[in-house]
Amino acid sequence: MFETWDLLWLQNYWWGIVSLLGGFLAMMLFVQGGQALIPALSKNDAEKTLLYNVFGRKWELGFTTLVLFGGAIFAAFPLFYAVSFGGAYYAWMVLLFSFIIQAVSYEYRTKKGNTYGSRTYELFLSINGYLAPFLIGVIISTLFSGGAFIVDESNLSHWVINTRGLEALSVPFNVLGGISVMMLSRVLGLLYILNTVVDKSIAHNAEKKLRIEMVVTTAFLTSYAVWIFIVPGVSANDAGVIIEANRYFYTFINHPIWVLSPFIIGLGLFLLGGLRGAKSGFWFATTGTVLMVFALLFSTGINGEPYYPSYVDIQSSLSIVNSSGSRYTLVVMSYVSLFVPVVLGYIVVVWRAMMRPITHDEIKNDPFSY
Amino acid sequence: MDLIDWSRAQFALTAIYHFLFVPLTLGLSFLVAIMETIYIKTGDEKWLKTTKFWVKLFGINFVIGVATGLIMEFEFGTNWAAYSWIVGDIFGAPLAIEGIFAFFLESTFFVVLFFGWDRVSKGFHLTSTWLVAIGTNLSALWILVANGWMQYPVGMNFNPDSMRYEMGNFWEVIFSPVAVAKFLHTIGGGYVTAAIFVVGVSAWFLLRGRETQFARRSIIVASSFGLFASLFLLLSGDESAHQVAQKQPMKLAAMEGLYEGEGRAGIVAFGILNPDKKVGDDLPEFYGDIQIPYALSLLGYHDINAFVPGINDLIEGNKQFHIMSASEKIERGRAALSDLSAYHEAKKIGDTSAAMASLKAFDANQSYMGYGHFNDPLQTIPPIALTFYSFHVMVGLGSFFIVLFIVLLYLGMTNELLTTRWALWITFMSIPLGFVACEAGWIVAEVGRQPWVIQDLLPTMKGVSALSTTTVKITFWAFAILFTTLLIAEIKIMMAAIAKGPHIAEKGEDHV
């Protein structure tokens, strides 16, 4: 079936998949949000341990989504993989380091022989809890604000600023994006607690916190969206890449089905989730998050508009047309993508099978608990 | 050291660390699946405790494998950006497929394996354990398909306009004989390493006179599994060497320290290389060596009379056996590169006929294009000593493990394990050797391929990201410090968990 699609369709399809993966990655950041909140939400060791066990059974999926996100970009948009990872080197490295320390921390935190003490691993989880969502927000924002790269005639790329991606932190818009995603992850973390933890004292604490965090997060998300709509962006025409005022606003208006609706519905579901709280609010808010982030990412590259502007050489800007894999590879990978629903299917089965809330007693009696 | 050396050093560092944990994950996941299956079949609680003990160790190792693995998915982009563009159209696909097919299987069912004992049915749990084992082994499949393609690139075409290789035939890539042999040999290595780990830890219990029933049971399961895996390793190793002989003759020559090619070539069973030996001189290759006659011809070409080219033949050429010299390959490579730039020049000014003519000339020498980047034929020789010794350490240890498994099985069957303390000591001391053998094998594969990152197509120096040396130094040391810090914790946690013994799997006693 995919053989008959034209190339731009395949490229759009894969940009859609990458955007969707970005959405799922943002959703799974509820684990990071939870990690950041654990010290504030727990009054004693028992509560703290309960919370680490609650989030410790979910960290792997976000981690795996990040890995797949890297792999999917490599396969479908190898030039972006080369330009961004090789160019914004330090930004990615810091992000990866923050995930590396997450992977061992749940398992090693309470183990005998862990050498550096529980507090070290708790610190690792806090670092990952704040830094990972923040940096992911910053990096997503650079798809709007651009990077300092040049792509030469052989399609080899060069980054012209020595700070290698860290300069993104000096752009207020990127920082706003970072804080927005960080706040978003905290709200999702709180909602997850409200929907899965039976301990009344923790739930009470989380409920109180949710109201304030929800208001702040909504303010950040709204200003982020407004900022995107008023800034100029880059777009492509026959003459090359040009700067266009309100480019993203027009993209949203011109693609009501694929961009505008998922964004508005997503935002609505997110707000609804925050209001519902313990009443399945987590599922509303995460679905909303997936849709919102999908719409944002998809808007940057749909139909061959440049999704990663270069602010040092605008003609080097990357679009799904000039950065994609060959037609053959995209077709092969499109068949592979048909397996994704199967993956989602077994994740749902396992998630449901393991649903029963974790209790203090279970942690005490289970030799495998964290 | 300059940029290329530091970039290689960082990749080697991260890959070597990652590969410390992978073999145990590959093998231990199957061993616990087998043990849990025995528990379900027999209903014997002792098997449940045995399974849980090894699952606990599996988990400690698994998470650090995941942690060190993350960087591998991104490091091609961060440090090998040119490589990622030039071959990403082929190389990226198996990496993405690995994510979809393997990693989610592992990470989803890992949670059930660990926390599902009382939450799901026994059948669901056993299925999950097997799916974790299958997932880990599937991930090895896809990454080795990718690596196999670096050793023997097939199923692609060069696109002179985008300046990259593009996939032409997916099936050729995944069913490449090199990829298949590599996959089988690597997972075999993982099974043997895990079996050595299990028998070694069990031997420690027997030496201390603790948990003797558990230890004996574990030794019998693991040494049967290990012996079976070793035979599998022997066959896949034979096939791997056969593939290397056909596809990477320079690597084979380096593995054997063979300078002067010969028919009826023998394999060096043991040898000390002469470090002063250079291409084309008359110095002896070894200070001393013991050879197994005919074995190399047999291994490489399945024919005791076959000619095995040496380093001299591959550098200087050998008319009798139709081997082109390296300097001629370099000449042709340069011609290809200059035709390619002529094509681009002509295209730029719109001269279609000149462009087509240049492209035609380019096609004639295209397969040597990679050689055009070298100045000196001697640059095409991999580090010989490292490749040679790594190969011999790997083969030597593999042979030793076969003997060890047979001895342990015999002692286990005749109930003499507890009384044969020397065998237990040797077994215990062998724990690190499985890891050493795996790392040595990885060095043979990767160092033996140098100076190429894609054999004969792309020199390693042409694949690197345009970073400053300082930048790579900073991240190299950051990785070295972080991974070493984590490794120390991992080993100490592992030792503490072992010292507690399998009764830790008893409810209520374990929680710290």
Image (cartoon, coloured by chain):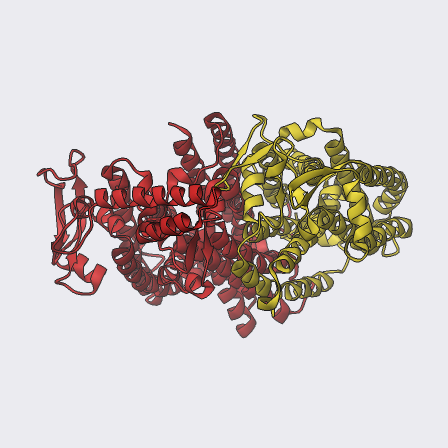
Chain colours: A yellow, B red
Residue A267, given in percent of the width and then of the height, sits at: 84, 49
Question: Nearest the camera: B401 or B389?
Answer: B389
In the image, is B90 to the left or to the right of B453?
right
The residue at the point 61 percent across, 43 percent down is: A318
Residue B82 appears in the picture as rendered: yes
Q: How many marks?
A: 0
In the image, is A91 to the left or to the right of A200?
left
Residue B429 appears in the picture as rendered: no
Residue B14, given in percent of the width and then of the height, sits at: 47, 40
Could you say which quadrant of the image residue B452 lies in? top left
Residue A173, given in percent of the width and then of the height, sits at: 76, 32
Could you say which quadrant of the image residue A111 lies in? top right
In the image, is B318 to the left or to the right of B6?
left
The residue at the point 66 percent across, 58 percent down is: A13
Question: Nearest the camera: B411 or A62?
Answer: A62
Compared with residue A342, is residue B347 higher up or lower down, i.e. above or below?
above
Question: Nearest the camera: B287 or A104?
Answer: B287
Residue B314, given in percent of the width and then of the height, sits at: 20, 47
